[in-house]
Image (cartoon, coloured by chain):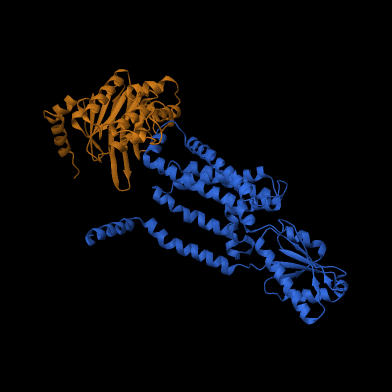
Amino acid sequence: MSGHRVAAITRRLLQQFRRDRRTLALLFVAPIVILGLLGYLIRGSASIPTVGIANEDQGPIGATIATALARSSVISTATINASDGDAKLKDGSLAAYIVFPVDFSRLAQSGTVTPEVHLEGSQPGTTAPVLQALQQALLSLAAQAPGQGLHVQPTLTYMYGGPGFDTLDYFGAAFIGLIVFFLVFVITIVSFLNERSLGTLERLMASPLRRGEIVLGYMLGFSVLALIQAAEVLIFALAVLKVHNAGNVGLIFGIEALMAIGAVNLGIFLSMFARTEFQAVQFIPLVIVPQFLLSGILFPVSSEPKPLQVLSDVLPLTYAVNGLRDVMVKGADLTWGSLQLDISVVLAFVIVLIVAGTATLRRRIA
Amino acid sequence: MSESFAVDVENVAKSFGSVKALDGVTLQVRQGEIYGLLGPNGAGKTTLIRLLVGLLEAHAGTVTVLSHRMPDVGALRHVGYMTQQAALYPGLSVEENVRFFAAINGVEGDAVKEALELVHLYERRDSVVSTLSGGMRTRCSLGCALVHKPQLLLLDEPTVGVDPQLRVQLWEDFRRMAEAGTTIVVSSHVMDEADRCQRLGLIQYGKVLAEGSPSEIRALAGTRNLEDAFLKLAGAGSPS
């Protein structure tokens, strides 16, 4: 072992990077951006679910529990009318609402209370704190009136999902799209750059081919592979992992397909800004990670700090993820306005990328 | 005027940043001749060929190819271009490569077989390109460039890295194609190849030093061989 030779390799490596400013920037800037984003997301998020309280109880106990719930640190509460509850669950302003029925206090005398708990149900993480807060409120009630042996039997109803709805069901819907988007993007950007470094792109540009024909041909070729992959992922998720699905499988595949085609065109477009496959790979953390963090996959967009919500709202993946979740978790169909919006935004994104990819193809030819 | 020329380059300039790759180049290539672009590495040969296929646009002057003012996609149907490295798809077979370039140039049928026979690769048509030797790749690349029977064939240093036997064979092929009416522009820095061209353009530092048949150039420089002629003319044309 020669220290000289080892040092020669080390020195050569560092010399190479000295001329590759882009890689250096990424090496030192990317971790700060990603960690900073993650920190801001987690610390700045208002992740406490809001629970509506509809107290119709003619006796005192409903009000007592409502007061105890309002003091809970794991949820925040809002007073509502029971008749508005479902609408507020649907529009996302409430994670749950609890109804204390008219005869609540009277039934408490006989030893059994049945508060009605209505859960939105699409986000498994929010169900637990709601039930926990109710449990604590009832415990404090029992402490105020000891010895009564109060028996609590809350009735749970789920707007979406159900008692068996778990974390995989929630994330599965988003990941079906994300996996396809990510893999297709990487394959496209690398092989388009490969065409550049092989010199075959130069040949294509010196042929009667038009730019749009090259981009379209690429798009169709990769889309064939991407669609097969999308079908495989979907079948595996539904048949093997048994991810919850309340919607139309064709619709899920349609959104997945749009994401795949979007990823193909994003790959083609961004390949114009890299000279080598090595540089192309560096786009992955820049393009994929912020979208992954901000598209609502991990943290609901509504719970993000306001400035990040603005960012989330312009990222196409946000709409794709939302669309997939609406279909799979909530059983949305094309009559839903929110789904129409989601699909339109993703579609518009795909079209913009096709145009952008075609427009930038000529520039970096020589 | 350009009617009679396959290639007509008039006073063309092209810079990359502060580097003048071409500085007032004028040259004409007649129909059906083999024209050699001769010059050392970095003289501007590849830049000139890229201008001829419209990959680059001149800053000044005009480039006319087959009566089309370049860049013009319309001319490219009749132009074959062989890049300096054998730009092929390594994962495809010889035939698949040639068939692809045939398809994007809008030809089908027997053209692929004819091209494969012309470059002596018909027997190896099912071989995957990544398994071929360098010489075979060069021939395959040539096959891709001529499969659509172009009127003008642009060859950027086609014989670099090719063994002497194959080089002789390739030049024999070029000669036959020219006889059949194809105009060929071939760039090279190998002087013994230059003698096989009907006319030459000597390029250095982005300028044409001399143009004419090999014997005219020897006479111009007053030397017995092209190598000496080039060195003499190049010495006279070096930048101040």
A202 in relation to A162, above or below: above
Residue B127 falls in image quadrant: top left
Looking at the image, residue A354 sits to the left or right of residue B190; the answer is right
Looking at the image, residue A331 sits to the left or right of residue B240; the answer is right
In the image, what residue occupies the spot 87% across and 71% down? A107
A115 in relation to A335, above or below: below
Q: Quadrant of the C terminus of chain A?
A: top left
Looking at the image, residue A111 sits to the left or right of residue A29; the answer is right
Residue A344 visible, this orientation: no
Instruction: Give the residue furthest to the top.
Output: B180
Residue A79 visible, this orientation: yes
Find residue A346 and report its horizontal and vertical position in percent. 60, 48
Q: Quadrant of the N terminus of chain A?
A: bottom left
Chain that is coloured blue in the picture: A
Find residue A83 and report its horizontal and vertical position in percent. 82, 62
Chain that is coloured orange in the picture: B
Looking at the image, residue A122 sits to the left or right of residue B31; the answer is right
